Image (cartoon, rainbow, N blue to C red):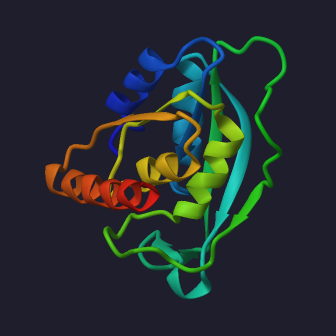
Amino acid sequence: MGSTGSPARRELCRILRPNGLACVYTGSYNEDQWNDALKNAGLVKEWRVIGLRNARNGTRVLNKTIRNMYTPIILYRNLPRGQLVTATMLADLLDYCEPEKDWDEWQKPVGESVQLLKFLSKPGDLIADLCVGSGTVPVATALVGERRRFVGCDIDETIVAAALTRVAQVLKKSD
């Protein structure tokens, strides 16, 4: 992650419209650094959601001394105006206990992304993922549908190929 994801942070601040929402999987270890960096960049922390992880598949951190059983998901807003208005109500604990690691070790549950997209976006919105990985967010975007569009990037072109394959499979099923 380096210096709290400086390139990702800069790009996030550049592409978010005023009042636009960002959903950031900070990880527990870097959560405070991300909060400080995004606050300094002008984004406002709106809410913290927890992605609960299966006890067998928690993430080890800090020299294998602590097993993290959850993933913090922080919601930020760029140049907020008024109250945060969302499409639906979202629980602050997303419990998808079955791990989904078929495509990538960092893969997140599709159901988690579906819930976040339903909460954070409206039909026709553009969804962006700056770390697309194996394609969980574009797959969730295709599943939620309602004219939502997706754009993403990743530094690993082999994993992007996997993401394209996953999205193609979902789109083929929906035809």
Percent position of residue 158, x then y? 15, 56
Percent position of residue 111, x then y? 59, 62
Residue 77 vs 56, above or below: the answer is above
Percent position of residue 24, x then y? 54, 42
Q: How many marks?
A: 0
Say left or right for 134 vs 115.
left
Task: Decide which of 140, 25 is in the foreground and name it.
Answer: 140
Say left or right for 141 vs 73.
left
Q: Quadrant of residue 19?
A: top right
Residue 163 vs 44, above or below: the answer is below
Q: Residue at x 46, y 56 (%)?
A: 174
Q: Residue at x 39, y 74 (%)?
A: 101
Say left or right for 60 vs 161.
right
Task: Decide which of 133, 5 is in the foreground and name it.
Answer: 133
Percent position of residue 142, x then y? 47, 48
Furthest-bottom residue in this view: 56
Q: Quadrant of residue 151?
A: top left
Say left or right for 150 vs 50.
left
Q: Residue at x 79, y 26 (%)?
A: 84
Q: Quadrant of the C terminus?
A: bottom left
Furthest-front residue in this view: 175
Q: Residue at x 55, y 14 (%)?
A: 17
